[in-house]
Image (cartoon, rainbow, N blue to C red):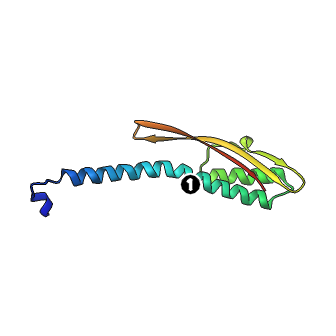
Amino acid sequence: MRHLRSNDGFVKPLLIIALLVIAGYVGVAFGIPQYRYAAFKSEVKEIARLELNNVAKTRAQIYAAAQEYKIPIEENDIVLTQKKNTTRVQASWSSTVDIFGVYQKTLNFTVDVEE
């Protein structure tokens, strides 16, 4: 309360709080797609490691994981290549981050896992 009545005013603390809130919002807006990418990539590694023989089942599991993490890909966008002892999974997508309708940034993600 002392600052509200002082000669320094209260505009500066309000401005700092507003900037911190905006910075937090921007951090979360860019952090969510990055988190989804990292979590999906980890899930794809696990699925590729466990499933060696059934391409259709592996693709369906990876697509289900993509839907769980709200990743905008179709089942046909998932490329599976199986060799004797390894499975290679490739997928890519783009996600657009919109900051208050003023700034838009398209983030491109690619998962290329061989297990």
Side (left or right) of 77 relative to 23: right
Side (left or right) of 23 relative to 59: left
Relative to 100, does residue 114 appear above or below in the rendering?
Answer: below
Relative to 41, does residue 95 appear above or below in the rendering?
Answer: above
Which image quadrant is residue 8 in? bottom left
Q: Which of 115 and 33 is in front in this view?
A: 115
Relative to 79, does residue 114 appear above or below in the rendering?
Answer: below
In the orientation shown, which residue stands out farthest toward the front?
A: 8
Q: Residue at x 55, y 49 (%)?
A: 33
Q: Which amino acid does label 1 sit on?
A: Tyr
Q: How far across and down, in percent of the image, does residue 104 sit?
A: 47, 37
Does the rendering let one see residue 37?
Answer: yes
Q: Badge 1: how crowded within 10 Å, few (<14), some, or many (20+)?
A: few
Q: How far across and down, in percent of the image, does residue 45 sit?
A: 72, 57
Does the rendering let one see residue 69?
Answer: no
Q: Residue at x 73, y 44 (%)?
A: 78
Q: How far across and down, in percent of the image, does residue 76 sit?
A: 74, 41
Disc tally is 1
In the orientation shown, which residue stands out farthest toward the bottom?
A: 1
Q: In which quarter of the image is the N terminus?
A: bottom left
Side (left or right) of 69 relative to 97: right
Q: Residue at x 13, y 58 (%)?
A: 4
In the orientation shown, which residue stands out farthest toward the right?
A: 84
The residue wearing badge 1 is 35
Q: How far across and down, in percent of the image, does residue 74 sit?
A: 69, 42
Q: What element carries label 1?
A: helix
Q: Which residue is drawn at 25% across and 49% down?
A: 15
Q: In which quarter of the image is the C terminus?
A: bottom right
